[in-house]
Image: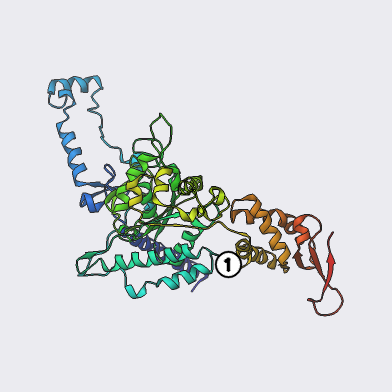
Amino acid sequence: MSEFDEKDKNQLEDKAQGTEEKEEEKKKEEKKESEYEDVCFICRRPESKAGKMFKLPNHISVCNDCMHKTMDTVSQFDYQGMLNNPSLMDDLNKNMGGKGFPNIRFVNIADLQGEGGIPNKQRIKKKKPKTGQEIVLDIKNIPPPHKIKAQLDDYVIGQEHAKKVISVAVYNHYKRVATGTLDDIEIEKSNMLMIGPTGSGKTYLVKTLARLLDVPLAITDATSLTEAGYIGDDIESVISKLLTAAGNDVEKAERGIVFIDEIDKIAKKKNTTSRDVSGESVQQGMLRLLEGADVEVPVGANSKNAMVPLATINTRNILFICGGAFPDLEEIIKQRLKKQTSIGFNAELKDKFDKEKDIISRVTVEDLKKFGMIPEFLGRLPIVYTLAALDKPMMVKILKEPKNAILKQYQKLLELDEVKLEFDEGALEAIADKAMEKDTGARALRAIIEEFMLDIMYEIPKDDNIGRVTITRAYIEGTGGPVIDIRSTSGENPDNLKMIEQK
């Protein structure tokens, strides 16, 4: 075989291999596309609602109704009698130089290039065909409350009551989803209201729970929600985010968890003459979501007015967890408790409650009503529990004990530079004292450590001889510096360290 024949053969083999790879990629794309429903280009309804679609070029699908409406409109339009008037057509042809009637197109397919291919984030996944009686969840696979709490203990310090409540509620919720009804007794939903000061771990608790459970979870906040028809997110956008978290799988989304943060921001506005579009009206709009109803939500968008398909989701099996800091709620509780004090030998002093730290744990439904939450809304959140404010010992534990503690994160960063980072107990207590002064909970810890670690993280990469850095109380309080241990150059052991205190 000549050199040219061999070259041609190699080129043909490469071409064949490239063709096979393209075919495989095409098959993968087709398989991926087949998982999603077709959406009508005109009315944006999915195939499950609109029925079988007409396929047009450029991946455009049109439902039966829209196609018939279009054809009826075309057939009724007469071009002002031009097509049925031979003499008018002759005059038009003469004026055009005998070139005939121009080509008229109602839709230029080329103009729709790129618009027909709706992104997958705005398409609904096809429902799997049901084969007889299928149980959505297996009760044996649902982790019991003590296991859920044990996993939460690895990440969340303190808040024992809150962890116990949320573990039991989640376990009962998924037993309810798995069994449906037992002996014609329908188990009601256990939606929750979580109250606690800022930085006490409300959002972190739910985020950790989502990581541990293999269920779709949407975390959203109520600050942007407004009444229908006003600028802002519609109330249904809460469910829309859950559908996105479930990969646009409606059945999976219908057994998910929704955490609505900053729920105290939709309290009734007091002493206002303007329309309350983001307060009481939002609470009223959320009633049917919490209770359980069929809701039409936009897919991949926050507004129903966006040109995206709408999916129908039943919220009966969706667990709602609402959380908020409820500022000034302590004052409302104190006012109620002070009214109960009486005169006499066994009477309690009015200023007794001013010194009580965990006053928020005495909250009642009446206090929340006075804060601005409507009774119908509170009635759909049967489980109300509080998170305690963090004290100094809890702050120290948060710094070092969780699996992803802040200190462990910095130690991991310096390990990459082959440097050991250590904090003595005095330094941890000094950091906790500074965090308590800021009164922003656990969020203050990272801000303080970032400030003190800045110089260390900047200087360490300069010197390869540094082997260990120890943060001391004196460095945190500004009266000294960290202890730097230098690797000794003498001897074969590289771990032989020489201590030098940086002033």
Q: Which residue lies furthest to the bottom in this view?
A: 492
- Return the residue nearer the eye: 326 or 134: 326
Q: Can residue 192 be seen in this view?
A: yes
Residue at 24% in and 52% down: 47
Tell me if 141 is positioned left or right of 359 in this view.
left
In the rendered image of this protein, does residue 397 appear above or below residue 455? below
Most extreme residue toward the right, as rendered? 490
What's under tag 1, amino acid-wise? Pro
Which residue appears at 79% of the width and 66% of the height? 464
Left or right: residue 188 versus residue 145 is left
- Label 1 sits on residue: 402
Secondary structure beneath disc 1?
loop
Which percent across, then down, holds residue 377?
A: 34, 48
- Number of marks in the image? 1
Q: How crowded is mark 1: few (under 14 residues within 10 Å), some or many (20 or more)?
A: some
**Colour scheme of the picture:** rainbow
Along the line of sight, the residue nearer the viewer: 67 or 188: 188
| Residue located at (81% from left, 76% from top) | 496
Percent x, y for residue 304? 33, 42
Q: Position of residue 307 (x, y in %)?
A: 33, 42
Residue 38 can be seen in this image: no
The image shows residue 413 at horizontal and vertical percentages of 66, 64
